[in-house]
Amino acid sequence: MRIQVGLSIMALVLALAGCGESESPGTSAATSFASDQRIIYKDGLHNENTEMIRLGDRILLIFRGGETGQTGSARAHINVFESTDDGQTFIRVSEVNANNLPDGRDIRDPKLVEMNGRLYMYAISRLPGAHYRDLFGHAWTIRAESSDGGHSWTEPVKTYEDVRTGGAETFWGFWRYAKRDDTVAGQRRHTLFATGYNDGDTMVGLFASEDGVNWEKRSVIISSYDDVPSETELQFFGDNNETAVALVRLDNRDILQDGQTAICTSTDPFVTWECGRRIEPRLDGPTWIVSGPAAQPRSFVFARKHLPCTRKRTAAYELRGNLADPNAPIEVCEIQELESAGDTAYTSLAPLGQDQYLLAWYSSTVNLDPPWLEGQFTPSDIWLANVDLNEAPATCAHPAPKRACVSPTLPASTMAFDITGTHLLTLAPEIWPAQPIFFRATVSTHGALLDVTLQVLDQLTKEPLGSSWSVTGIPLGADGTFTANFGTRFVPPAAYPVLNDPFLTVHEFVFTGKTISTDSFCGNVAGYAQVTGMRVSDQIRLEGSTFGATRVTGDTLPAPVSACAQLQS
């Protein structure tokens, strides 16, 4: 059965050069490397996961749409658009969904590969819902085919199972596809390789296919729970493409923060890998292109960039050094930060001419600059830019050193207030301030000492949840400052359903605050949330989070106030 979608005469309407947001957070120093940055598609939904391919005089641009956020459901589909003018305008030509697959599966992370005269669309399909570290998502790599250049597609089917385990499903999602041409006994051979990662994000594997349909697992590139390996780029180097190099995304720091990228190498037959080199930027959703002569290749990577306080950008980098030599040092150069914010990146490239490319990425609303987690559940748009590799700077500008999230400055009041009584305390986590945690705070003032008891509340009903948290004998400064260390505490799921974790705890949980009046106090929060287990890679830092507390009078709770600036305004 084929899925035939009629041609749409609707062009992608918002081909806006610059989009009127030149002062947005995503703007960097003027450069002609990536120019004419523009939104090419927006519809008020969460659009993401771009991919492009050039087919003669046409460019296909595809991306995931149909959803309001990252959470997967059968509403998601892959939009297919076509350009005949080198990306200046696009029209919608088809759509691919996973509705023929069982259990309401999602579809995401599409890739396009032309092989043996056939156009393949590969994608990852998981069970509906949100899956931390992709656990219990039961990822399938699926494949649809087109014989008319992307205007119609077969229904997607699962394209990989580990037959060595008797057909048992091992849940691999393929990320990057790369063709390898080599010569064996005088015969030219063409093999399609893919990198994939498993449910749980503990392992990245290498897979091979001679026809794009039947796949075998060739090897494990890296296996490590603490490194959280996932999206992996792949290139081949050498006279016979005998050396494979993989750039592996590692979420080996806090979940929503920065991390590292592993540089892994292997030689034919690509069974064992060396992954000793690490570079500090964590390259999320990357696209890697190698340009220039084989003797002196240049490597450009377009990927998500990480800023303090879980803000994100899309950026262009150059990796300098011999990537194929496991002993060679690698220098990371940041070329340009693109218009982007919130949930962003998952880039793609299509050639326009000699060292000229069309670049696509997605981004949350740029001028709002939401935290990454918030951005995953808000609208995002598809962006384009023209890239000229010849304009890459000769000098290397190293990425800025990693910085911690800086907490807001406390008010400059000079006196302490007696805040004895009951207050509604609203904590705004830096990861998503609009989704707060609520407490009923009972405070007793004894001269220059405070006793504080926090009762966590159901986020929706404001009813008490679990045991209260108490700290006594807290010194109160003459200017109203205080520091309350609550240590390690369990957070009931209903108190913060955003993370939906029955084992959520907060550690080194410290409130640094100041009394504002007899009816209010506010301040900053430090520590970390442990999502599961005790691993560093499963933590979320709380620095940058704020709280505000206002007195409860009568039976009605006051309006939530979560920061000092709100109380002072």
Image: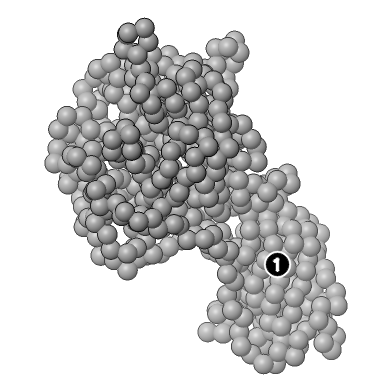
Q: Is residue 443 placed above or below 158 in the rendered structure?
A: below
Q: Estimate how packed mark 1 is, as few (under 14), some (14 to 19) or many (20 or more) residues with alpha carbons within 10 Å.
A: many
Compare residues 189 and 568 and report the one nearer the observer.
Answer: 189
Quadrant including the N terminus: top left
Foreground of the two, 63 or 422 = 63
Left or right of 124? Residue 188 is: left
Q: How many marks?
A: 1
Write down the residue under mark 1: 439
Res 198 → quadrant: top right
Residue at image coords 49%, 17%: 269
* Residue 263 higher or lower than 155, as above or below: below
Q: In this view, does 124 lie to the left or right of 131?
A: left
Comparing 459 with 170, the one in front is 170
Q: Which residue is drawn at 45% across and 57% down?
A: 399
Give, as a three-letter code, the residue at label 1.
Phe
- Image location (x, y in percent) of residue 270: 50, 21
Q: Which of 535 and 240 is in front in this view?
A: 240
Identity of the residue drawn at 61% across and 52% down: 254
Residue 546 at what x, y percent from top left? 61, 70
Label 1 element class: strand
Q: Where is residue 29 in the image (x, y as percent from the top left)?
A: 32, 64
Q: In which quarter of the image is residue 277?
A: top right
Model colouring: one colour
User: Residue 45 at x, y = what percent?
Assistant: 37, 49
Q: In this view, does 315 lie above or below 103?
A: below
